[in-house]
Amino acid sequence: MCGVIGYYSDERDGFADIVNGLFQMQHRGQDACGVAVSDGRRLRLHKGIGYVREVFGHRPSDDFAGRLGCGHVRYPTQGGNRPENTQPHMVTTLDGGILALCSNGDIVNYWGIREWLEARGVDFEGSNDGEVLAKYIAWLHVSEGMPLVRAIRRLQDDIRGAYSAVLVTRERLFAFRDPYGVRPLSFGTDGKDWIIASETPALDIARMDFVDEVGPGEIITWDEEGMHRLPHPDIIAARRGRVDTAHCIFEHIYFSRPDSKAFGHLAYDVRKRIGAWLAETDDVEADVVVPVPDSSNAVALGYAQASGLPFEIGLIRNHYVGRTFISPEQSRRDEGVRLKFNPVREVFEGKRVVLVDDSIVRGTTSRKLARMVRGAGASEIHMRVGSPITAHSCFYGIDTPSRQELIGSRMTLDEIREHITADTLRYTTVEGLKSCVDRPEGFCFACFDGKYPIAVAEEKRMELVEAGT
Ligand code: SF4
């Protein structure tokens, strides 16, 4: 999981808006960040390992003044946390051109494309999929003489997987998405200047009004002649019901901020609907509903409102620890759980507690939390989960562990309940989750049902291409 941002203006400096937008999306990646900006003549890059405030906190904005640019916060899924894997990736092309690219997602055929480029003399500094995207576009542009829009369109045909990307040259900004629209990418304007971002709070902080999402497979360009939208021809066919999208449902469950709008929904609304579904299909007797903060707050609120039970903030989160799931190393994760939550004893003492979490991945956090809540005096713990059983890994930009590490792939429901020491345990079902979004057939649920949509959709798309539609 990563976050990207792009900025375009005919005249106004956008460095502060880019950095503020990255700060709003810090939860999408805490390991590294970077910005590339152009003043129309020179494209400059600054990136480093660490939080946005660490990498950019002391850098005066006039150091990096530019009227177009892109930025990135990184959580490594492909390639380790090394400086050469940080984004944006800047490529100087043989014809004297220069481009910088940042992306969110994972390429399924990364090695095939990389080896193809290496066979043509292209060197790689790191092992990150954004570098492959940047160098593939640069190669097509220079060696095949393709204009950048055609090179991106060719990339969309050849590269499979998830990518929501922003590319900047000295004078032009491009935003594009894989044909299945796996990861979110939205854009907005104040009537003059533009921001494109993985999450809409990055638009809000710059006082930009949401305009639309970059469509699946769409390419949008901004330059001195204005904005141009180029929808993908296969997606036009899709609107006739021929090919489908594969929006990541986990963005609504956990990854995105609750105040983010993506795939036509506000994440906050989807989470409350999930909580209401859990309550409406439950018959447990309890005294209080408590969320595991922060990503479960809205699910627990939806549960409480639908059930009529009181909602209490019984676990206090230390916001300086970071997300447990997002930490790449096991040792940091274990340490993080203990440091992260503290129970409010007065909320739990003698109570039958509905404890609501968004998901159970390894089971480590749930087990420790259950022990903590019982230690704080709860008489019963009824764990309710705002997602179905996570039993499959993600290959589209989320660093879920291998299947063996996923508790949902190794244990039955009752074994999981016993392992986490809950009195009862219920998950949202896939069908229940589908009832919480409009047009559920346009979403990916693969980490729950194992039906990986890109391979299916790709076959469908190839049929279309062969049929000449
Ligand atoms: S496999 Fe899961 S996490 Fe990955 S894109 Fe699909 S729904 Fe999202």
Image (cartoon, rainbow, N blue to C red):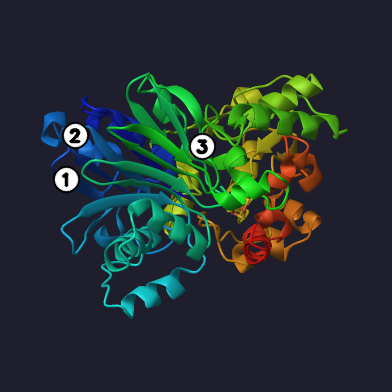
Q: Relative to 158, does residue 19 appear above or below in the rendering?
A: above
Left or right of residue 54: residue 346: right
Q: Relative to 207, does residue 324 appear above or below in the rendering?
A: below
Could you say which disc has been placed on residue 66 in the image?
A: 2
CB atoms of marks 1 and 2 within 8 Å = yes
- Residue depicted at x 35% and y 45%: 73
Q: Amino acid at mark 1?
A: Arg
How many discs appear? Answer: 3
Q: Position of residue 452 (x, y in %)?
A: 66, 61
User: Taking the image as drawn, is residue 303 in sight?
Assistant: yes
Q: Amino acid at mark 3?
A: Phe
Q: Amino acid at mark 2?
A: Gly
User: Taking the image as drawn, is residue 348 in sight?
Assistant: no
Quarter of the image containing the C terminus? Answer: bottom right
Q: Position of residue 289 (x, y in %)?
A: 70, 27
Quarter residue 447 falls in: bottom right
Residue 439 vs residue 287, the one in the foreground: 439
Mark 1 and mark 3 lie on one chain; the one further toward the N terminus is: 1
Residue receiving disc 3: 341
Residue reaching furthest left? 63
Tag in front: 3 or 2: 2
Residue receiving disc 1: 44
Left or right of residue 180: residue 189: left
Left or right of residue 428: residue 106: left
Residue 128 vs residue 324, the one in the foreground: 128
Disc 3, SS: strand
Q: Position of residue 69 (x, y in %)?
A: 27, 39
Disc 1, SS: strand
